[in-house]
Every structure is written in structure tokens, then in C-alpha cells.
Amino acid sequence: MDVSIIQIIVVILLWFGLGIVIFRYTRGAFLLQNRFILHLLNFFFWLWFCIFFLFVNSFIWRFHKLLGGIVLFILAYLAVDFVDWVLSGRFSYPRTKKKIPGVLRNIIKFLLLIIFILGILHYHFNIALTGISITSAVLAGILGFALQETLGNLLSGIALNMDSPFKHGDWVQVGDDEGWVVDISWRSTTIHTREDDIVVVPNSMVSSSRLINYSRPQRWKALKVEVGVAYDSSPAIVKKIMKSAAEDSRYIRKEPEPKCWLMEFQDFSIRYCLKFWVRDYTDAYDAADDVRTRIWYAFRRNDIEIPFPIRVLKNYKSSAADDETRYINIFNILREVDLFKPLTDEDLEILSRGVERTVYGKGDIIIHQNDLGSSMFVVVRGDLSVEVMNKWGNYQKIGELSQGAIVGEMSLLTGEKRSATVRALTEVELIVINKNAFGQILIKNPKIAEHLSSMLARRKEEIQTKTTDGISQDDEQTQHDRTSILHKMQYFFGLTRK
């Protein structure tokens, strides 16, 4: 049987053309999912090619030995690649069930390729290996002396892969460098830092440096925040406020609960330490920032001072003028609220002088659903989110409130539990109206309760219409709600007996 070079080339081109067609039409998915089958097909094709075209045809085999060597090299590479596939997906350490590291697999592939190449050179091309071995020994000595550091990195890379103190995606600290691991090679480990820098650390340095893996044994970790507080604040109140600030943060785990300690009596303040557990250490900066921000707003709402060791000189011209300006500002804001339309200017003046203004930070919870309350809020600036808890225990957003809106009026006027959770979407400034301030007006003029009960009944009807796709309640039900609200107001403020 006589086979020409053209026939051999045509067969090879057809085989590669078939592979290209399969790759294009399947977009590589078939190749990735059926790698074992493709290895077998490739191997048997080249084996058949070698037997049929080369070994059978003495003419081709004799005069085209180079072509046979190339085919044998291809078969050797396919065999090595098949061994790598077996090691990567089929074998693991018996006790730990860990996969064989990529660095070790690459070394095995390299050694197998060297063995196959030497075998092909000796048995196919009849080249003596004695000279090659002597030359290789000399080159190995020279390279070993010149590449001591590289070989050290290689051995360290093997040790790191065998010991596996970290893996891709872990958040680690090596020396002064901190970030998540994006690559582990035979020579170095690559870390992506918080500053979006790529740091390449030699494996020998990784092995000899102090290594901290923040992703093990679990991804959630403890953080500490320290704050100095003035001496005139009660430690019990300070600890309670700091723990509450941490519990409301979305970055913090509910279990374990935050802990707070009084650490030291300093010259200008008392130092407190708050310990809490963040869900993922990669959010450590955001979590610490969120908790510190919440602590600042909570301290401000509760008149707790964070002192600082400098001398501050202030020139107070007239505190009475400042109070009058504050009163006028609150009076004008309350006058625009529909709920207070029935109040006279005299009543509104009494109310304006009995309320206070407070500030909440973004994400702070103003009121919790089902909590008892006896106060309401008027939004001066900022945006609020109104949320209710569904049957699965998750909060569902039902609306937003902005400047001029009121929150918690039913709790203020009737003492009912909070019907929803209200959270700050931005920094918000609120006017807080408590029971005592509003009670002075109702005691002075009990008839105002009738106007307010009618307005609250109408508001309840409007809310129900929105939540029931436009289905409004009848007049009889509205009247019943008005009477029920009036009786609750009268009892809550002591205007009548139960």
C-alpha cells in the first residue's frame, strides 16, 4: 500500500477541521464537559494514524521519520494531559479529601514530558542518552547555583500547596500586605489589596513571614472599636447605647452578641471598647465605619459627649435669642403639618416649646415594629423607609417618607404598638413630640381630641384604600374607627375614665 504525503496532510487537516467545527458550534462547552472522551478520541486517532500511515507503509516510515517523531510527541503530550486530568479531578488525599495542588500537578506533567521526550529520542531516533545525561548534569549544577532563589520559591510553592494554609479567594495578610488571594503559582502568590493594587509576593517570603488567614476557620470575624466618653456619662448607659448601635448595623452578626467594656480612665475621657462580629472580614472597614457613625449619632441624641484634649473658646452672645429662633423654626414646621391644623397658635406655641429636635444617621432605625411607644416624629429633612415584617420574618418595604411627613402618630395619641419599622435612608433630622408635650394641649382643650380622632380615622381609611387596590371601607366603619380612636385617646391621656 502506497501512501503519499498529500494524503497524510489531508487526513491531518480533516481531523483538525472537525475539531474546529465542534468547538465553534458548541462554543467550547462540549470540550469542557467531555474532556475524557476527547482525550480518548485524540489518542486513538493518532495511534491509528501512526500504525496505518507510518508503521504499515515502509516508504513513509523510512523517509519521513521526523513526521513519526512529531506524531509520537503529540501522543506523549495527550497521555500527559490525560494524567493531569485524572489527578485534577479524580484523586485526593485520603484523610483530608483535598485536591492535589496545581503546582504539584505541573511538576508531574513536566517530569513525564521529559521522560517521554528522552524515550522518543532514544528509541525512535536512536540517539544515545549518555551525552545528554552528562550535559544535563552539568547544566543542572550551573542552573541550580544560579537559580537558588527561584528554586527556593519553587519548593516553597510546593510546600504551600501541600500544606494549603490558604486558597483562591481567601482574605490573608502576609507581612504588611493584606488582601484576597487571586493566584497561587509555583513561584509566587498574588494578592489583590483593598487599595486595588496587585501585590506579587515570592513564595519563599510567604513561607517565612507571619501569615494571617481571615477566611478561616470561618469568614465572620471579631472587630473592636474604641471610643472616649466624658466622665459625666453613666457607664451603664454608654455600654447599652454602643451595643445597640452595633446591633442595628447590617454588617454585624446577631450571634455572638456585641460586647462592651470600660477599658481605662484617661486624662480627658473614659475609654470604652466595643467588640462585635462582622459577617465577612472583607467588609471590616465598612462595618467599623458604620458602627462608629451610629455611635456618634446615638451619643448626640442622648447628650453624651466625646471629649478631645484641646482648649475650645466660644463666645455666646445670647442664648435666649438662640432659643427663640429655635422655637420659631419648630413652630413654622408644625404649622404645615395637617394633623396639627385644628390647633390654635397658642396651642401650637405650647407644643413647639415642649418638643426637641434630633438627628439620625443613614441606616439607623427610628422605631421598631411592635414596640410600645408614646411619641411621634415630624421629618424636617431627609428620607425614611417604612417596612413591615412578613410571615417569613423578613422586612418588606411598603413606602417612603420625606420632608413634612409624620411618623408614629397612633402611638403618640393612643399608646398603640408601632405598626411598622421606620429606617433612615439618609441622614434625617426629626422633631420628636412626646406624650407629655401633647398632653398639655389635650388637657387644656379636650375637644381637640375629637378633631384629631376624625383625621386619624380618615388617614387610616386612605392607607387601607391604598393597600387593598382601591377598595375603600364604608362610612359606618369609618365612624366606628373614629369613635374607637377617640376613646383610646381619652383613656391614654386621662381625659375620661375607662
Image (cartoon, rainbow, N blue to C red):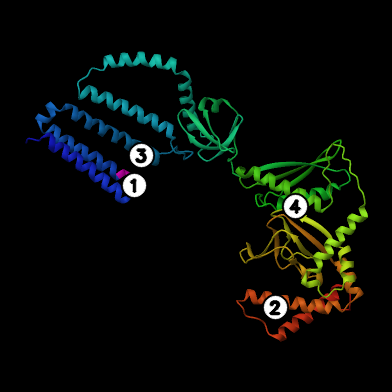
- Label at residue 85: 3
Query: For this rendering, which residue is in front, 74 or 11?
Result: 11
Mark 1 falls on what kind of element?
loop
Task: State how far apart marks 3 and 4 are (Cα).
Answer: 54 Å
Q: In this figure, which residue is indicated by the disc labeled 1?
A: 28
Q: Earlier in the sequence, mark 1 or mark 3?
A: 1
At label 1, the amino acid type is Gly
- Label at residue 461: 2
Q: Is residue 165 left or right of residue 395?
A: left
Q: Earlier in the sequence, mark 1 or mark 4?
A: 1
Mark 2 falls on what kind of element?
helix
- Label at residue 244: 4
Label 4 neighbourhood size at 10 Å, few (<14), some (14-19), many (20+)?
Answer: some
At label 2, the amino acid type is Glu
When asked about the image quadrant of residue 113, the answer is: top left
Q: Which region is colored magenta? A: 31-36
Q: Earlier in the sequence, mark 1 or mark 2?
A: 1
The answer to whether one can see residue 120 in this image is: yes
Query: For this rendering, which residue is in front, 386 or 62?
Result: 386
Task: State how far apart marks 1 and 2 are (Cα).
Answer: 61 Å
- Label at residue 470: none
Residue located at (62% from left, 47% from top): 279
Asked if the residue under mark 3 is in contact with the one under mark 2, i.e. CB atoms within 8 Å, the reply is: no
- Identify whether 154 is placed above or below 449: above
At label 3, the amino acid type is Trp
Query: For this rendering, which residue is in front, 353 or 134?
Result: 353
When asked about the image quadrant of residue 444, the answer is: bottom right
Q: Earlier in the sequence, mark 4 or mark 2?
A: 4
